[in-house]
Amino acid sequence: MTGNADPTSSEADYFFDVNTSPLFTKDAHNKINILGQKQLNTLEGSSLLDIFLTKGNVVEPHYHQNAAELVYCISGAATVSLLQPFTKELLHFPITPGQVANVPQGWWHYEVATADDTHLLAIFDAPNPEVILGSDILKFTPPEVMAHTYCMDEQKWKEVTAPIQPSTYIGSYSNCTRRTGAQWRYPQQAAYIHPVYYYPPYMY
């Protein structure tokens, strides 16, 4: 049964195995499982994503239109990056086991694993988390609109965005062979500048 069940009903569920509910699987070590009201019908105001990543993998840029997100690190290490929509500042929060980063509702953000065997728990204040993915925005917005809006060559835009797969969720792709410029750089240490951690921008 899906939807919010009457807790006194015989159809009410109180247990669920999140391991049986995949949202996205890149490979055995990079995957996301989901728990929401569709999986556990007695949930009311919360839901979660169980996220497993190896070093260098990224939960692609996205935002949640219906919920704030609290990212808790269970193991490994990750950096949670979010765009502050009022100041246009890109904030970076490194987290290790026992630490959290909070993403307000509707804020553009992404997570980068900076260690192998990273396990994150993303907790939402909505019974079913909704998401708008960067890959979907780039893939489904007509190229002529993007080219005209940003004064670009339409054919070049099509060429650049051709490799993008809708609903990427975890990048880069397993078959990615791109090797241009410096390799992915991992910040080694954060400098604390009140009230945020600051990292130099990630670079390829």
Image (cartoon, grey):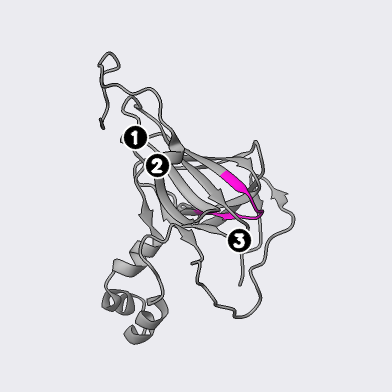
- In the image, is residue 181 above or below residue 58? below
**Would you call the spot at circle 1 few (<14 residues within 10 Å), some (14-19), or many (20 or more)?**
many
Q: Earlier in the sequence, mark 1 or mark 2?
A: 2
- Residue 27 lies, in percent from the top left, at 50, 57
Residue in front for this viewpoint, 70 or 165: 165
Q: Quadrant of residue 126?
A: top left
Q: Earlier in the sequence, mark 3 or mark 2?
A: 2
Give yes or no for residue 93 being in the magenta stretch.
no
Amino acid type, mark 2: Ser
Given contact means CB atoms under 8 Å apart, are the residues at marks 1 and 2 in contact?
yes
Asked whether residue 60 appears in the rendered view, the answer is yes
Q: Quadrant of residue 144?
A: bottom left
Amino acid type, mark 1: Gln
- In the image, is residue 57 above or below residue 16? below
Q: Which residue is mark 1?
A: 39
Q: Which residue is mark 2?
A: 21
**Would you call the spot at circle 2 few (<14 residues within 10 Å), some (14-19), or many (20 or more)?**
some
> How far separated are the C-alphas under marks 1 and 2?
8 Å
Q: How would you classify the magenta stretch by its main secondary structure?
A: strand
Given contact means CB atoms under 8 Å apart, are the residues at marks 3 and 1 in contact?
no
